[in-house]
Amino acid sequence: MTMSEHFAPFDGAKVAILRGGDVLTLLRDDRPDIPYPAQWDLPGGGREGDETPFETLSREVFEELSLTLDPAQVIYHAEERGHVDPVTVVHFFVLRWDELSDAQIKLGDEGQGCAWMEARAFIMREDAVNPLRGRLTRALDALGL
C-alpha cells in the first residue's frame, strides 16, 4: 500500500519521531476544554477533508513543529482504534530521523513545549497520553527496539 492510496474513513494520525532511542514529545496545553490537558503527547492530530493518513500527519507535524516529513522515513505504520471513540480508526506511524537537529524544530501555536525523551521512559510516564503509551509499546516491540 502506498502513501497516496485511498484509505477507509479515519479520524487522525500520530507519529513517534525517533532519534536514536529518544522520541520527540509535545507537552499539551493546560486547558480544561481539550482532552489530556498538560500531558505529554506525540505529534499529529485530526484529519481534514479527504487527506490520506500520511497527508494528515505531514500537515499536523508541520503546524505543530515546522517539520516537513519524508515518507521514506517511515519504519512502522498501523491502524489503531481511536481512544475517544473506539469505533473510529486512527493511524500510528514511527519515523526514524537520526539527523534531526533541535534547531530545526519550531513549536507552533499549540502546546507548552516539546522535548526528547527516551522512548521506553515515555511509555512509563503517568503524565503521558495513555493510548499513545500502548501504541508506542506495540510499535517498538514490533520493530525490536
Image (cartoon, rainbow, N blue to C red):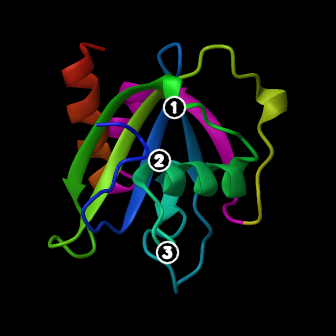
* Marking on residue 71: 1
Whether residues under marks 2 and 1 lie with C-beta atoms below 8 angstroms apart, the answer is yes
Q: Which callout, 3 or 1, points at the residue further toward the start of the chain? A: 3
Residue at the left extreme of this rendering = 87
User: How far is disc 3 from disc 1 in space, using C-alphas?
Assistant: 20 Å
Residue 139 horizontal side relative to residue 2, left or right: left
Can residue 127 be seen in the rendering of this structure? no
Q: Which callout, 2 or 3, points at the residue further toward the start of the chain? A: 3
> Residue 10, percent across and down?
31, 66
Pick the front one: 42 or 45: 45
> Residue 63, percent across and down?
70, 58
User: How far is disc 2 from disc 3 in space, using C-alphas?
Assistant: 13 Å
User: How far is disc 2 from disc 1 in space, using C-alphas?
Assistant: 8 Å
Crowding at label 1, few (<14), some or many (≥20) Cα neighbours within 10 Å? few
Q: Residue at x 28, y 74 (%)?
A: 84
Whether residues under marks 3 and 1 lie with C-beta atoms below 8 angstroms apart, the answer is no
Q: Is residue 64 above or below residue 119?
A: below
Q: Residue at x 76, y 58 (%)?
A: 108
Q: Which residue type carries mark 3?
A: Gly
Crowding at label 2, few (<14), some or many (≥20) Cα neighbours within 10 Å? many
* Marking on residue 49: 3
**Magenta-highlighted residues:** 110-130
Q: Which residue type carries mark 1?
A: Pro
Q: Secondary structure at mark 3?
A: loop
Residue at the front extreme of this rendering = 5
Residue 85 horizontal side relative to residue 112, left or right: left
Can residue 70 be seen in the rendering of this structure? yes
Q: Is residue 33 above or below residue 35?
A: below
Residue labelled with disc 2: 54
